[in-house]
Image (cartoon, rainbow, N blue to C red):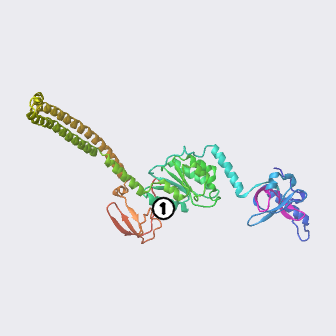
């Protein structure tokens, strides 16, 4: 936008003699010089403030004051620059964002702003800008839908935390992770989380992680604050960095009611730093219960137990078969004895039946039954052998799988780490110490190995270690 040049009399020529007691300036010349300086130094300004003392004379111009918590300045919006939207926005007590230039009203010698544009200011303007950015990022596909969200690792090898190293958020995350699963290592990618440089630093932290990719889960966290404090997470730089992260990202930004654009690009919104840490790892007590349940299921489906059950059912079937054979052998004898008794009472009608019964006496039919029993026993023996062979093969296969699962379970056992020579260090209250930094001399400690523990006391301050690859 072009603005008229300052009046010619306002300029102070190079080498001109400044006013003195013998050659003073006029008031008009001083005010003209000040007006020229104001127009030259501030030809185009954006200023936000609260509207006060609004007046609308018959000329149609708008005269008002803009103020903040420390200062105020008079403003004028001429009728030729006044539009319907500007007229609606100018109201006492309302925060507006105006564009104009500085000038000195020479008739009164007062500094004022000549306004040519008015728009909504304050929180309403920020919300509008945020909504416009949200729609633009959504159109570019930077937000994850439910189908695009990646599954979180059930047991992370390592967790990366992107946050400020001096904030309360990193302490909350380490406290929750230490309580739920203390053996999972954590790597901090330090960055500022507030201020004008925070978006770029957060994006750079994600870039450093992408180069190393030394964890399979990333937590982006920051403690609570105002909407202005969380503004870094409502920027294109941070949203793009979260979207491009090669592993799943959990955000924990602000309080439970706070929502940022970075939450929409993440795989899971943990709402707070502690909530993000809760969702990142399973509880060790729940994990132990799951392992115990797997052990019981493994024992219930063990091949040896199934073989014993099969053999027991086979023995039951063999007993039932023997009982049935005995009943088949005993029945003809009982029938014969009964008919013999009847024959003594009525010999004539029963003579033919007696001859038929005589042919079915046990001593006559026993050889045939014994042959059938021998053949049946042979088939049972062969079936038992085939069953034993099959179950042995199944048992060997399941034994190999059991060994593999047992190895995996031993790898998840926290005490297995201690058995390899590592130790856990606790303070007097029983809290696990992850670092000796900050421990004063004479602090009582308890050092625990896999089979023993010992009490100790620090004799000197902690010395930082330089580790390769850290």
Left or right of 5? Residue 450 is left
Left or right of 140? Residue 153 is left
SS at mark 1 in the image:
helix
On whether residue 102 falls in the magenta region, the answer is yes
- Count all numbered tags in the image, as a single digit: 1
Residue of label 1: 175
On whether residue 415 falls in the magenta region, the answer is no
For the residue pair 204 and 427, the one nearer the viewer reads as 427
Percent position of residue 461, x then y: 45, 68
- Given the current orientation, which residue lies at the most extreme top position? 352
> Quadrant of the rendered structure where residue 270 is?
bottom right
For the residue pair 232 and 342, the one nearer the viewer reads as 342
Identified at 89% across, 71% down, the residue is 21
Does any portion of residue 270 appear in the rendered image?
A: yes
Percent position of residue 409, x then y: 36, 51
10 Å crowding of disc 1: few (<14), some (14-19), many (20+):
some
Identified at 58% across, 52% down, the residue is 263
The vertical placement of 243 against 8, above or below, is above
Main SS of the magenta part reads strand
Does any portion of residue 46 appear in the rendered image?
A: no
Percent position of residue 267, x then y: 54, 49
The vertical placement of 240 against 467, above or below, is above
Percent position of residue 154, x then y: 45, 50
For the residue pair 217 and 391, the one nearer the viewer reads as 391
| Magenta region | 89-114
């Amino acid at each position: 936008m072009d603005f008229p040049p300052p009046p010619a009399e306002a300029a102070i020529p190079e080498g001109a003699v400044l006013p003195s007691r013998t050659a003073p300036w006029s008031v008009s010349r001083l005010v003209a010089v000040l007006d020229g300086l104001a127009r030259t130094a501030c030809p185009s300004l954006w200023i936000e403030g609260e509207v006060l003392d609004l007046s609308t004379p018959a000329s149609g111009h708008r005269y008002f004051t803009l103020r903040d918590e420390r200062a105020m300045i008079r403003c004028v919006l001429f009728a030729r620059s006044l539009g319907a939207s500007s007229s609606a926005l100018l109201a006492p007590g309302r925060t507006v964002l105006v564009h104009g230039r500085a000038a000195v009203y020479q008739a009164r010698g007062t500094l004022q702003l000549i306004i040519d544009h008015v728009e909504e200011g304050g929180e309403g303007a920020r919300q509008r800008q945020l909504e416009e950015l949200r729609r633009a990022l959504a159109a570019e596909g930077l937000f994850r839908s439910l189908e695009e969200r990646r599954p979180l690792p059930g047991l992370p090898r390592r967790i990366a935390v992107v946050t400020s190293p001096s904030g309360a958020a990193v302490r909350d995350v380490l406290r929750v992770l230490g309580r739920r699963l203390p053996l999972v290592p954590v790597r901090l990618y330090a960055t500022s989380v507030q201020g004008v440089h925070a978006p770029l630093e957060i994006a750079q932290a994600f870039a450093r992680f992408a180069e190393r990719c030394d964890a399979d889960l990333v937590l982006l966290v920051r403690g609570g604050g105002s909407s202005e404090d969380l503004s870094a997470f409502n920027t294109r730089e941070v949203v793009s960095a979260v979207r491009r992260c090669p592993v799943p990202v959990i955000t924990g930004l602000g309080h439970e009611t706070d929502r940022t654009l970075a939450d929409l690009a993440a795989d899971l919104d943990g709402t707070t730093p502690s909530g993000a840490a809760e969702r990142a790892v399973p509880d060790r007590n729940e994990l132990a219960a799951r392992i115990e349940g797997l052990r019981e299921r493994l024992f219930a489906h063990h091949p040896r137990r199934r073989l014993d059950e099969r053999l027991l059912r086979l023995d039951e079937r063999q007993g039932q078969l023997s009982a049935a054979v005995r009943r088949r052998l005993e029945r003809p004898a009982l029938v014969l004895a009964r008919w013999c008794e009847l024959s003594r009472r009525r010999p004539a009608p029963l003579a033919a039946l007696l001859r038929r019964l005589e042919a079915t006496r046990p001593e006559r039919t026993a050889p045939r039954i014994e042959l059938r029993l021998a053949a049946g026993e042979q088939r049972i023996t062969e079936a038992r052998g085939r069953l034993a062979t099959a179950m042995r093969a199944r048992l060997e296969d399941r034994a190999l799988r059991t060994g593999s699962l047992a190895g995996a379970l031993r790898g998840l056992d926290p005490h297995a780490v201690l058995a390899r020579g590592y130790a856990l260090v606790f303070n007097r209250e029983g809290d696990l110490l992850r670092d000796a930094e900050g421990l004063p001399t004479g602090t009582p400690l308890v050092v625990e190995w896999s089979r023993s523990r010992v009490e100790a006391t620090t004799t000197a301050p902690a010395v930082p270690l330089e580790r390769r690859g850290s």
